[in-house]
Image (cartoon, rainbow, N blue to C red):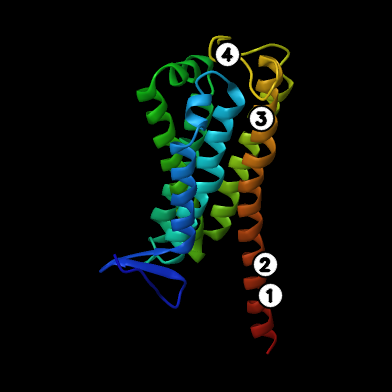
Amino acid sequence: MKVQRTRSGAFDLFPGLVLPWQALLGMGILCATWLGPLPTLARTAFSPGMITHLSVVALSGPLIGYGLASCAGAEIQTRRALSLLLLVLVCDMAVVLGWHLPGLHDAAARSWFVFACEQITFLAVSIAVWYLAFESREVEAAGALVLFMIFMHMTILGCVLAIAPRLLYDPEVCRGAFGLTPLEDQRLGGVLMASWGAGAYLFGALVLFLRLMQRGEVASSREDV
């Protein structure tokens, strides 16, 4: 297979199939995450499961979504894009919070099928959020707000996990990892979510906010001229 790189930094894999380097990097991280030891470790410990989760929603998904948005051919209609952003915000909250409920979390640890469903939904909502947030200049303000809202709810959930006085999940699937007790392991997972996971979405929101400021400065300078 011959791969050619275009001027925009994208890679022409097949005729009609062009992928930006960010999307390819995201796919590489995704393969390393899913094919490595983390999914197996996640069946008996909380923090490896959280690392798996965050590798998908805070690394692979953002890179793939942003990369696809950067080379999108036609922008989505503004009103439709705003509606889709609101929808994916609700879906993201439902998916992330839902899979961290004790019943669903424990089911994903016990069943590879449920685990696959969990990971696919994590990836889908993450790609959708980042694609829609960066796909159109007309909705950058809404995209920044959506990313900030996700930062908020991930921070809150991470803090709940980090300060919980007791183990929230079945001890059979949360036995501890990296030499930590089960409760310490759960708290480590919470810290990772509140820092790494939430931080990625805060970074995206700041990028969009800075773009809006720069665009506003350019527009005001033109008006002065």
Q: Secondary structure at mark 3?
A: helix
Q: Which mark is residue 158?
A: 3
Which mark lies nearer to you, 4 or 3?
4
- Residue type beneath disc 2: Met
Instruction: Specify whether 92 is left or right of 176.
Output: left
Residue carrying label 1: 217
Mark 2 nearby-residue class (10 Å; few <14, some 14–19, many ≥20): few
Which mark lies nearer to you, 1 or 4?
4
Residue 114 visible to the viewer: yes
Q: Are marks 1 and 2 in contact (CB under 8 Å)?
A: yes
- Residue type beneath disc 1: Glu
Q: Quadrant of residue 190?
A: top right
Identify whether 143 is placed above or below 166: below
- Residue type beneath disc 3: Gly
Which mark lies nearer to you, 3 or 1?
3
N-term mark: 3 or 1: 3
How far apart marks 4 and 2 lie (CA) works out to: 44 Å
Residue carrying label 4: 169
